Amino acid sequence: MMQYQDQEVHFKQLPSLASSPDKSIRGHQLGYRNTANSYDGWTRLQFEQYIRDLVVFGTNSIESIPIFDETMSPHFKVPPMEMNAYISTVCQKYSLDYWMWIPAQFDLRDTARRNKYLATFEKICKQSVRINGVFFPGGDPGDNPPELVIPLLQDIAGILKKYHPLASTWISLQGFTAAQSRYVYKYIQEKMPNWLGGLITGPSSPTVEETRAALPVKYKLRHYPDLTHNVRCEFEIPWWDPAFSLTLGREAVNPRPAHYAAIYRAIDPYIDGFISYSDGVHDDVNKIIWTALSWNRNADERDILKEYSNYFFGSAVSEEAADGILALEKNWQGPIVSNGSITSTLVAWKGLEKANPLLDTNWRWQMNLLRAYYDAYTRGRFIYETQLEQAVNEELLQAGSIGADIVMKEAGSILAKAGTEPVMADIHNRIIELCEALYKSICLQTSVTKYKASGLERGAVLDFLDRPLNNRWWLEDEFKKIRTLPEKDKINALLGIANWEKVSPGSYYDEVGNVGKSVHEMKGEDWRMDPMLRKSLNPGYDFSDNGLSRKRLSWLTNMRWPIAMEYTNIDTTASYVVKINGVGESLLKINGQRVAPSHYGREVGDIKEFPVPQALVQQGKLVLTWDDINEDFLNWRKQSRVNEVWLIKTVQP
């Protein structure tokens, strides 16, 4: 490995230079568009530098987004058409393949819009010095059937060949139904079109195994991996603690070397290469991991990170920085409260920060520091705010003796301490400083209000820095409602809140999908055995009200259906009832037997109750499962799901 020092590079020993890549397509999508959380603020020189950095690690393809129909970014330094033409010249300069992602976000039966689209495409072809491939997504975005898409692609291919004779046209099956995918497979198998380069598989696509099996051998299969998102995406973080989903959200700085290496190795046998989906530099490590593995599938991820750190940070810190990046990934594994390594990770990065002041302006260094500080702050704040809510619940239990209004006033004062008596103020301030530094160094937009990020789900972690990690907002709203009730009803309502998660001996409570509060929930195989989470299922994280929902926090994390809830050592002489909090339907089975509800609420916060048949209780073990329901006709936000499950012992022996 080349050694890097100030104004000096050298080899300790001469390296072996005989090396060739495993994959022919090794690239990344760098979309100069408003929704990107950093690319849209770059200059030409920043784009060229970033592309050169990717090339060092084996990238040979860059994909742009030249005709995406969206609002202009306030960060643009040059018009999009001009920047994309420049990226094409950069690819020409370094002998890289230049690709374009060209969705059609309109009804293709609209002849006028179709003609305009093709005219724009031809203009781009004329001004681009190099085009090697175009990628048309079947969906995400777009909503046209293949019967309309394929004729459009034939027209696209004709225009493309006029200006770039060796270029090829590709399509993904994203968003297509099973029948529509079969239509495309059959068309290719029967027509064997010469204009088609191959198929692309990615988010919302059929599996790589299915597509490779259906695709004639003459065509290539390119993957479009989502390396950029954490939740509501193709490769979600396995069982992410809700405290992180509430704050860091979908596009935080997210080095995931071990998980993405496992995913790559699972997909590798089926693909001819990849060009990743990326919406900013926050996924920089993930890009390098995939690029290095596409060159050598047997490369070790720690060795890749050592090369990454050696090149970008210097040889003196290559080992420590590599281990620090691996530690950031581990910060997101398991319950946040019991993950004490979050604190040690910050200690390590603070040590590196102090010892290497010359790296303070390096944006990759800044991103790692931001994550280390943010994770530790979130953990400390979660522990503190949980303690505040526990104190509130103890106060509410006194409502019958000292009065409902008095305890609600005191509870409000306790909840307010999160703001009036905050914890870890120094770390809070350091996070703000790092966000400012990252905006200046690489235009990373961590706030909608301060840095004009295009949306709260687009990496705006600064806007969620102090989002309550307890039920403060929900409690404040409940108190307003309760104050209008008669005193007796006030007391009963407050006692219900105080005892929400408390159960008597022999009864159990689980917040389904919360890795720290779901001890009875079966979670399937570990991600190391099931990296794409096909067997294990994964929690869903509600982003209603742009992530600022005032619902009870347990209603913001869910499972479509848990794999199972398992309870052992059941008292065979007692009676039990299952209570479920969740939206929509819940076709519950206990020990394989469908059970009937005695109460069946369907809205957010409503309770369903299922008395447990005594014959099942006498088996001494209860396993809850759910029959699936086809709700494809519903928007995913309205589909049924489970939030909380209680097993209540109702009769003592």
Image: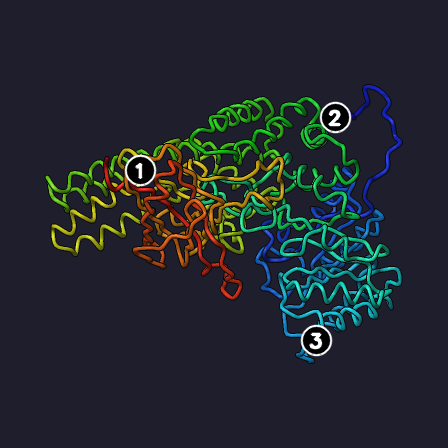
Residue, far top:
12
Q: Amino acid at mark 1?
A: Ser
Whole-percent x and y of residue 275? Answer: 73, 50
Name above or below for residue 14 compared with residue 164.
Answer: above
For label 1, the SS is loop
The residue shown at (15%, 52%) is 489
- Whichever of callouts 2 and 3 sits on the residue coming sooner in the sequence is 2
For label 2, the SS is strand
- Whichever of callouts 2 and 1 sits on the residue coming sooner in the sequence is 2
Q: Which residue is mark 3?
A: 114
Q: Amino acid at mark 2?
A: Tyr
Q: Which residue is mark 2?
A: 4
- Applied colour scheme: rainbow
Q: Which residue is mark 1?
A: 507
Q: Amino acid at mark 3?
A: Arg
Q: Is residue 38 left or right of residue 266?
A: left
Name above or below for residue 528 compared with residue 211.
Answer: above
Q: Is residue 69 left or right of residue 269?
A: left
Whole-percent x and y of residue 648? Answer: 30, 42
For label 3, the SS is helix
Spatial distance from mark 2 to mark 1, Cα to Cα?
A: 61 Å
Name above or below for residue 463 compared with residue 2.
Answer: below
Whole-percent x and y of residue 203? Answer: 64, 54
